[in-house]
């Protein structure tokens, strides 16, 4: 009985980002920072120590005018589930403090700030640079600490943080469902801040295993790909692009390299 | 390295042999001193151990917690008799599923706009807080650190647990107990538990992570993922 119930509750939350729609405006980054109390500094020009849970990258096809093309690629945490969905994501398997774990019921990779002691092994292990280190305690502009999100605990100096797929929103949605006597969520009840903020509607979020959710069909598109797929990290963030060079860039193919047959785990 | 004692030992047999008849108070004293000092070491060890134990188990816990009185001595039992829906009459769920926790002044004013009874605590409450529209700075015994996410809805609504499992029989109390604040962490003593050694008899004696995990293991078959209880 308990096992059945557990199986029922198993979700695989993921994202499909349509790069043809993304304009690179950065609204997702702003929404994310506001939602998740992400600290920032007065001078953010040094990108090596700035923190952005979702970061918009600019890709170019490397050709000169008039063949130049660019593509913007927002990169949240991929919430990798590893080979065979075992939850052996690169960061989880190296953490010596068990400060990060893979939740098999939601498919979300957590980060527990009070448990993390800042060795940054996970940052080295993550092939997507999705993890960030707090080199300083956060300093909010005067008065801003009053507008912090109470559902997300602010981080302290010396710990690693990353995108949580706005897990606090899932918790809040579940609370509402419980009080209404439900145990299941509707698709629109749990959406990440970046998804809702995207003015182009490029980001779609939902349960990848649920046929009723939009992401279920979108991820099957022939234009769909994932980043660094051949590392077999099995990410839960899919990208869509009609452009071949973008799809190739997603798996880091080098110019001299012939295209190897992709293996999807 | 020769000490005075070594020299004394070397010399003493001769002295004893030569002057067997003569009383040698010095010698006797020497031997007695040796025995006494051993006794003293043991004595001091025991005294030291006892002092350390007393310091560690009695004095330190006393120093560790500061005693704070609640602003108003609230009578749960009295209110519980007057309301219809038990605990949820005042500690209710909002429509969005969040839990209201300690009632705000607006709720109390519904009945206590003016002094109703003869209780001096009620009079104090109305005069100090209701009249000035100040929120009562209640000290919350069950306040958890900021990194903890606790869902009342999941426990009370979905799992249908009783409030007493975690909060004890506070609903039947006529006085609020003294709030003991950990001087180092700033949290209530109810989190660590009254017993400094960590023994507990009732489910509500302690509210640490291990206690949550133990119950989760028992009831759901798994301690749960980190994000279930952390944020």
Image: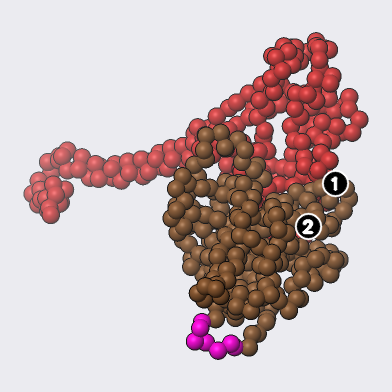
Does residue A61 lie above or below A26 as drawn?
below
Callout 2: 10 Å neighbours few (<14), some, many (20+)?
few
Callout 1: 10 Å neighbours few (<14), some, many (20+)?
many
Chain on which label 2 sits: B
Residue B116 seen by the camera: yes
- Chain shown red: that is B
Q: Tell me where the magenta segment starts and ends, as one range.
A: A254-260
Q: Quadrant of residue A23?
A: bottom right
The foreground one among B187 and B2 is: B187
Residue B78: percent from left, percent from top: 83, 23
Does residue B180 lie above or below B112 as drawn?
below
Disc 2: which residue? B219
Question: Number of callouts in the render?
Answer: 2
Magenta stretch, overall SS: loop
Left or right: B4 as drawn, with respect to B127: left
* Secondary element at image label 2: helix
Left or right: A168 as drawn, with respect to A53: right
Q: Are marks 2 and 1 in contact (CB under 8 Å)?
A: no
- Chain shown brown: that is A
Disc 1: which residue? A179
- What label does residue A3 carry, if any? none
Residue farthest to the front, as pictured: A66
Residue B112: percent from left, percent from top: 81, 17
Q: Residue at x 76, y 55 (%)?
A: A190
* Secondary element at image label 1: helix
In magenta segment, residue B104: no
Q: CA distance from mark 2 to mark 1?
A: 20 Å
């Amino acid at each position: 009985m308990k096992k059945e119930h557990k199986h029922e509750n198993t979700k695989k939350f993921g994202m499909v980002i349509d790069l043809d729609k993304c304009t690179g405006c950065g609204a997702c980054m702003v929404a994310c920072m506001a939602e998740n109390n992400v600290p920032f500094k007065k001078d953010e020009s040094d990108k090596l120590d700035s923190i952005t849970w979702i970061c918009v990258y600019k890709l170019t096809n490397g050709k000169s005018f008039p063949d130049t093309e660019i593509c913007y690629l927002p990169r949240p945490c991929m919430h990798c589930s590893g080979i065979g969905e075992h939850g052996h994501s690169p960061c989880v398997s190296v953490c010596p403090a068990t400060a990060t774990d893979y939740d098999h019921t939601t498919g979300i990779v957590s980060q527990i700030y009070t448990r993390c002691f800042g060795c940054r092994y996970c940052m080295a292990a993550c092939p997507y640079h999705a993890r960030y280190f707090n080199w300083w305690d956060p300093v909010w502009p005067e008065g801003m600490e009053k507008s912090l999100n109470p559902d997300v605990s602010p981080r302290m100096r010396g710990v690693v943080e990353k995108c949580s797929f706005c897990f606090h929103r899932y918790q809040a949605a579940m609370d509402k469902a419980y009080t209404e006597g439900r145990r299941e969520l509707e698709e629109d009840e749990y959406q990440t801040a970046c998804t809702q903020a995207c003015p182009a509607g490029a980001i779609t979020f939902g349960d990848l295993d649920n046929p009723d959710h939009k992401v279920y069909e979108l991820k099957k598109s022939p234009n769909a790909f994932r980043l660094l797929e051949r590392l077999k990290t099995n990410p839960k963030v899919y990208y869509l692009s009609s452009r071949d060079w973008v799809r190739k860039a997603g798996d880091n193919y080098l110019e001299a390299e012939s295209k190897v047959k992709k293996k999807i785990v | 390295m020769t000490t005075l004692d070594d020299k004394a030992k070397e010399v003493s047999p001769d002295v004893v042999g030569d002057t067997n008849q003569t009383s040698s108070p010095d010698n006797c004293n020497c031997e007695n001193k040796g025995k006494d000092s051993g006794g003293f070491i043991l004595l001091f060890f025991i005294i030291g151990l006892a002092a350390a134990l007393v310091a560690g188990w009695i004095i330190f816990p006393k120093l560790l917690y500061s005693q704070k009185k609640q602003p108003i001595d609230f009578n749960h039992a009295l209110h519980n008799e007057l309301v219809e829906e038990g605990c949820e009459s005042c500690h209710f769920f909002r429509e969005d599923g969040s839990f209201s926790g300690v009632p705000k002044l607006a709720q109390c004013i519904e009945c206590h706009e003016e002094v109703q009874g003869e209780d001096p605590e009620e009079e104090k409450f109305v005069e100090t807080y209701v009249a000035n529209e100040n929120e009562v700075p209640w000290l919350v015994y069950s306040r958890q650190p900021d990194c903890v996410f606790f869902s009342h809805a999941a426990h009370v609504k979905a799992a249908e647990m009783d409030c007493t499992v975690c909060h004890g029989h506070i609903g039947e109390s006529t006085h609020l107990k003294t709030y003991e604040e950990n001087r180092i962490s700033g949290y209530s003593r109810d989190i660590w538990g009254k017993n400094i050694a960590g023994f507990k008899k009732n489910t509500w004696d302690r509210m640490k992570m291990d206690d949550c995990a133990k119950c989760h293991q028992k009831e759901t078959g798994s301690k749960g993922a980190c994000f279930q209880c952390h944020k």
